[in-house]
Image (cartoon, rainbow, N blue to C red):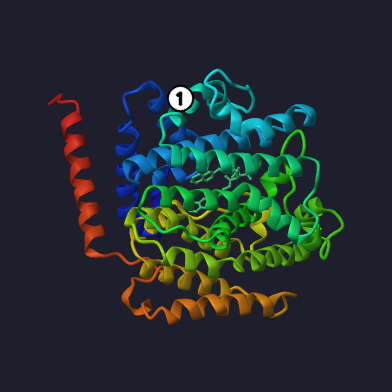
Amino acid sequence: MVSLQAIWRHPDDLYPMVKLKLAARRAEKQIPAEPHWAFCYSMLHKVSRSFALVIQQLDTDLRDAVCIFYLVLRALDTVEDDTSISMEVKVPILMAFHRHIYDREWHFSCGTKDYKVLMDEFHHVSTAFLELGSGYQEAIEDITMRMGAGMAKFICKEVETIDDYDEYCHYVAGLVGLGLSKLFHASGKEDLASDALSNSMGLFLQKTNIIRDYLEDINEIPKSRMFWPRQIWSKYVNKLEDLKYEENSVKAVQCLNDMVTNALVHVEDCLKYMSALRDPAIFRFCAIPQIMAIGTLALCYNNIQVFRGVVKMRRGLTAKVIDRTKTMTDVYGAFYDFSRMLKSKVDDADPNAKKTKENLEAILKICRDSGTLSQRKSYIIQSKPQYNATLIALIFIILALLLAYLSATRPTNI
Ligand code: D61
Ligand code: MG
């Protein structure tokens, strides 16, 4: 639940949050009638972290393909992530997964909670997959095959170098970018984007996740999962887990800032990719997660909390991003705002300060050169709340309703 205090601090979050809540409720009600599609869409809402909402607003046939693409890869990832399956069992499943999606009889039980339901009832996903157009099916099969092989390779191998890190992120997220570009092209709505730009879209999102999820991944039971490359963390500590101990706070934050600086390299490609999109729904689908990522990086940079608990963007700020992202002007504006916020956090004593500032300057320049910055409403998070007329009116309406409700339910023992 959102607290009254949060609304009081950021009153202009309220309207986009209510709007988002209503849109989410509407989306959940629009579950199709056929049981396999009903299963797929209700599963999408349960297992996707934030992607369900953006997938839901695509047009019908592309939406079905992206929904199945998501569920197939989420199932593959559930196999990868289940640390209780032995290597001997896991590797052959990952390698053959692209063939299992054609087989309505196949299933493999693993994962927990909603993920377990997805795996146990996977036949609904295969049934829906078999109803997609062949262009969509081929793209999904190809990416599933390559991702499965890549995940298998990293089951027996640690992320040592920055090249390993880029390679692992290519398998689990860059390939999603390549697959989505193929699906967009197959829908007839977009030109085919280059593999390099599509890959960067995935790398930027995945690296942001890996940075933000340090603590969750290191504390994973029965075995911690480590994706931060040794080539980076070994400059600061002897063991990756040492970053979470209080005595290493200074080193931990420096290492974190190094990781953020590395992720920022992909922004230029991402902006290029998004600027070439034509369809408004596809554009929003791509742009919203990217803006959330740069916002998350701005929040994580120089922030020791990454090693202590969960660092996430405010729900209200997320709602605002979803509400305001419509055109490339909005994207340049958001990247500009969050990059400036990040730049203001750079301390000259940080070992990578110069590199970080260079990367940020390059992003700020692209945004400025777009010539569109003056047309937008700034995201820069106001330090003092502004109580406008709408809010005051709203408070009066709520008070009036409350009063009416109370007087109607009051016992009438006069
Ligand atoms: C445009 C729009 C969305 C895009 C894109 C371009 C390019 C790439 C991506 C989305 C993928 C970004 C993945 C970032 C989140 N990372 C994960 O979920 C990790 O799992 C990776 C393997 C499964 C990928 C499944 C996926 C994700 C998003 C999709 C999609 C498929 C299909 C369509 C649309 C979006 C991560 O998961 C666990 C966690 O986040 O805690 C992991 O295991 O590392
Ligand atoms: Mg995984």
Element on which disc 1 rests = helix
Q: Kindly identify the residue that appears in the image at 20 percent across and 30 percent down.
A: 410
Q: Badge 1 is on which residue?
A: 127
State the residue in front, 258 or 372.
Answer: 372
Q: Kindly identify the residue that appears in the image at 63 percent across and 22 percent down.
A: 108
Q: What residue type is disc 1 on?
A: Thr
> Where 254 sits versus 54, above or below?
below
State the residue in front, 241 or 405.
Answer: 241
State the residue in front, 40 or 324.
Answer: 40
Answer yes or no: is residue 233 visible.
yes
Q: Quadrant of the C terminus?
A: top left
Q: Quadrant of the N terminus?
A: top left
> Where 159 sits versus 267, above or below?
above
Q: Among all residues in the image, which is located at the extreme left?
A: 414
Q: Where does the image place residue 77, in percent across and percent down from the top left? A: 62, 37
Horizontally, residue 102 falls left or right of residue 288, namely right
Horizontally, residue 317 falls left or right of residue 96, namely left
Q: Where does the image place residue 321, in percent across and percent down from the top left? A: 40, 58
State the residue in front, 133 or 171.
Answer: 133
Q: Ligand 1 closer than 8 Å to the CB at disc 1?
A: no
Q: Where does the image place residue 209, in percent across and percent down from the top left? A: 60, 52
Q: Among all residues in the image, which is located at the extreme top?
A: 105
Answer yes or no: is residue 8 visible.
no
Q: Kindly identify the residue that appears in the image at 26 percent across and 58 percent down.
A: 391
